[in-house]
Image (cartoon, helix red, strand yellow):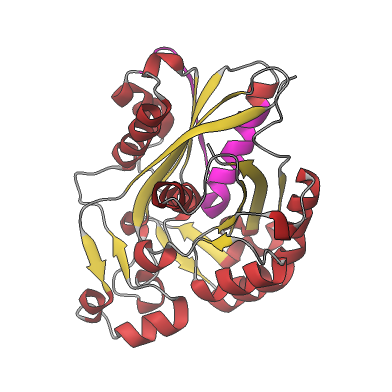
Amino acid sequence: MSGSRIVAVGHYQPAKVLTNEDLAGLVDTSDEWIRSRVGIRTRHIAGPDEPVDELAAHAAAKALASAGLTPADIDLVLVATSTAIDRSPNTAARVAARLGVPRPAAMDINVVCAGFTHALATADHTVRAGAAARALVIGADKMSDVTDWSDRTTCVLVGDGAGAAVVEACPPGTEPGIGPVLWGSVPEMGHAVRIEGTPPRFAQEGQSVYRWATTQLPPLARKVCERAGLRPEELAAVVLHQANLRIIEPLAERLGAVNAVVARDVSESGNTSAASIPLALSKLIEQGAVTSGDPVLLFGFGGNLSYAGQVVRCP
């Protein structure tokens, strides 16, 4: 079995920007309160006529264009999302239809905030096994659809967006560009992050999530590096799920990635759930903060108290 690699990425965010000052007009909060607790300044919010599959398709189209590929080159579409309203057709099939991908395997993966890294591992395994030649892996969420905008503990956190990657088999004789995944969950603590009810609403136990993320995840992130055969100080960048700066910064520090750029896109995008990692990675590449071949740790965590991470080489 050959390894796989990411050959291109892309991202998309809706045009509407919601600032902390805007939120202060909706609920009892302030710019200082939000920044000091979660580090968020702004977030992008999709309109009622912008469904999740549209956000995903925009990001995927950019990734395809960057790779110099057409939709006909894709035979697997994976979409990580937890905010799709409809059950069938699934989001992946709708993205494939929007793009004109002919006859792909099309699947949604719902692991909430860890969805993209789970989907990336699934694509890697599928390509390695020879069941697909080239995959579109997308993280897309419209958190604004599942948010109670009168609840100041959650509405200040969320944003909408999508990020995508094109994954293909590595040329013979080359090193894999996607390292071994480390994944798992804490099912008995699934209640700590929820999207439940009719209509579905996002809720979380903030302190429980904070303690779990800052204490339990650093050794797991170090183990991801070990599986990739790298020391944390060799990483060029660390892209964690963009949940909260008070989680991201301690986790990155305890990992020991002293030479790495740490993605802090949460400040301008908020928590976009499954979109947050590919969105932040695409921006780092677009900004030139990392270059082709650089090793980058991707580590998703959160909903279901699930986690998944791998070291990838930048396209």
Question: Is 43 located above or below residue 205 in the figure?
Answer: above
Query: Residue 208: x, y in percent?
Result: 62, 75
* Residue 24 placement: quadrant: bottom left
Q: On the rendered image, what quadrant is the N terminus found in?
A: top right
In the foreground, 232 or 209: 232
Query: Residue 4: x, y in percent?
Result: 64, 28
Residue for point 30% across, 68% down: 42
Query: Residue 86: x, y in percent?
Result: 36, 38
Task: Tell me the magenta residue range.
Answer: 101-125
* Number of on-image labels: 0
Q: Give the left or right position of residue 128, taking residue 119 as reference.
A: right
* Residue 223 placement: quadrant: bottom right
The answer to whether residue 312 of the structure is visible from this angle is yes
Residue 110 on the magenta span? yes
Q: Give the left or right position of residue 227, taking residue 105 as reference.
A: right
Query: Residue 265: x, y in percent?
Result: 43, 62
Residue for point 63% across, 59% down: 305
Residue 273 on the magenta span? no
In the foreground, 101 or 196: 101
* Residue 219 placement: quadrant: bottom right
Q: Give the left or right position of residue 265, taking residue 160 as reference.
A: right
Residue for point 64% across, 69% down: 251
In the foreground, 88 or 24: 24
Question: Is 166 located above or below residue 115 in the figure?
Answer: above
Residue for point 38% across, 45% down: 162
The answer to whether residue 88 of the structure is visible from this angle is no
